[in-house]
Amino acid sequence: MGRVAAIGEQTRVAGLALAGTVVLVAEHADAVRRSWRSLPDDVDLVILTPAAAEALDLDSAPLRSHRPLIAVMPT
């Protein structure tokens, strides 16, 4: 089983580290995109904050075909 990662603002994702989540703090759109590209290969689920999801343009074809499952936190 793969790992879980979270990308987004520190105040929204930091606590997930307590559950063993790989936390990638990204406070702006460029940082979100860099974090996405740097995900470890063994990540099977990525939790995104709403702002991170917006920065990644989840409707784009490359993201839909990418391996990790994506979940967006509620606002």
Image: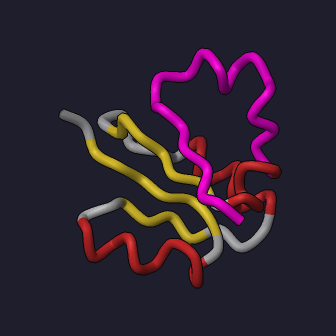
What residue do we see at 70% from left, 20% from top?
62
Task: Give left or right: position of 32 versus 41.
Answer: right
Q: Name the quarter where the C terminus is drawn.
A: bottom right
Extreme residue toward the left, this view: 1
Residue 26 in the image: above or below residue 10: above
Residue 74 part of the magenta-drawn span: yes
Q: Position of residue 58 (x, y in %)?
A: 74, 34
Residue 52 in the image: above or below residue 16: above
Residue range of the region highlighted in magenta in the rendering: 55-75
Q: Position of residue 36 (x, y in %)?
A: 59, 45
What residue do we see at 81% from left, 50% from top?
54
Extreme residue toward the bottom, this view: 11
Q: Name the quarter where the N terminus is drawn.
A: top left
Residue 46 in the image: above or below residue 27: above
Q: Position of residue 21 (x, y in %)?
A: 33, 61
What is the quadrant of residue 70 in the picture? top right
Residue 65 part of the magenta-drawn span: yes
- Image label count: 0
What residue do we see at 71% from left, 73% from top?
27
Task: Give left or right: position of 3 versus 49.
Answer: left
Q: Position of residue 4 (x, y in %)?
A: 35, 49
What residue do we see at 72% from left, 58% from top?
50
Task: Give left or right: position of 47 versus 33.
Answer: left
Viewer-side residue, 28 vs 38: 28
